[in-house]
Amino acid sequence: MKTLPAVATLLAMLFAPQAASAATATHPSARVVLATGGGEQLAAAGFSTFGTISTSGAIVDRFGVGFNFDALTFVPQNVGYGPNLFYYLRRDNSGFSTFGTISTSGAIVDRFGVGFNFDALTFTTLNVGYGGNLFYYVRHA
């Protein structure tokens, strides 16, 4: 049993890298839950994973990203942080939302706070009435 903390640390590094996000650093107890087989507890705590869904229905979790991610969109061109990035919205326990980026290598970076209760995010290069190269969101009251 004395090796459990070392195993917990190793598994946490594999599934939720330390450099991934400030969000993972604020919930260190979740790392132990993961290592002790409590995946359901992590889901209940708002732990999020980045994954893929094929058109054949294959669902694959690629890597852990932290807690309470709500929205995700992909932008192939560089709109300020580099090309080929996923952009996300995540919230803290008070409902405050943060905008950030995820690279396909697994680097997760919170960029800036955007306010409360954001739920959805998309991007278009087209000017649909508000200008081109903008992100659009939905949030609830």
Image (spheres, helix red, strand yellow):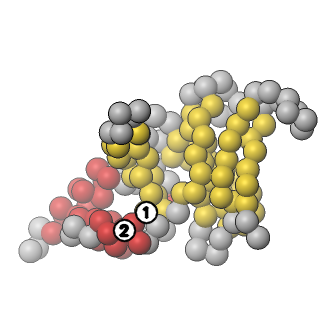
Q: As shown in the figure, which amino acid type bears the numbered disc 2?
A: Leu
Residue 73: which disc? Answer: none
Kindly identify the amino acid type of the residue bearing the numbered disc 1: Phe
Residue 18 figure quarter: bottom left
In screen coordinates, is 30 left or right of 103? left
Q: Can you give x and y, in whole percent of width and height, for residue 46 in the image?
A: 46, 67
Against 75, residue 115 (above or below) is: below
Secondary structure under the numbered disc 2 in the rendered image: helix
> Which residue is tagged 1?
47
Looking at the rendered structure, the secondary structure element under dot 1 is strand
Name the side, left or right, on which 27 lies relative to 61. Answer: right
Could you classify mark 1 by the number of other residues whose Cα lies within 10 Å: few (under 14), some (14-19), or many (20 or more)?
A: many
Residue at coordinates 24% horizontally, 56% vertically from top-left?
11
Q: How many C-alpha atoms fall within 10 Å of the one at disc 2: few (<14), some, or many (≥20)?
A: some
Outermost residue toward the left in this view: 1
Counting from the top left corner in percent of width and height, residue 80 is at: 71, 32
Q: Which residue is at a point 32% across and 39% down the rendered structure image?
A: 58
Q: Position of residue 91 (x, y in %)?
A: 61, 64
Q: Quadrant of residue 140?
A: bottom right
Q: Nearer the viewer, residue 30 or 74?
A: 74
Please say whether residue 49 is visible from this viewpoint. yes
Q: Is residue 136 above or below residue 31?
A: above
Placement of the N terminus among the 4 image quadrants: bottom left
26 sits to left or right of 10: right
Mark 1 touches mark 2? (CB < 8 Å): yes
Above/below status of 33 relative to 52: below
Q: Which residue is mark 2?
A: 42
| In the image: residue 62, left or right of residue 126 | left
Which of the marked residues, 1 or 2, is nearer the chain's N terminus? 2
Alpha carbon distance from label 1 to label 2: 5 Å
Q: Quadrant of the C terminus?
A: bottom right
Vertical position of residue 65 compared to residue 38: above or below: above
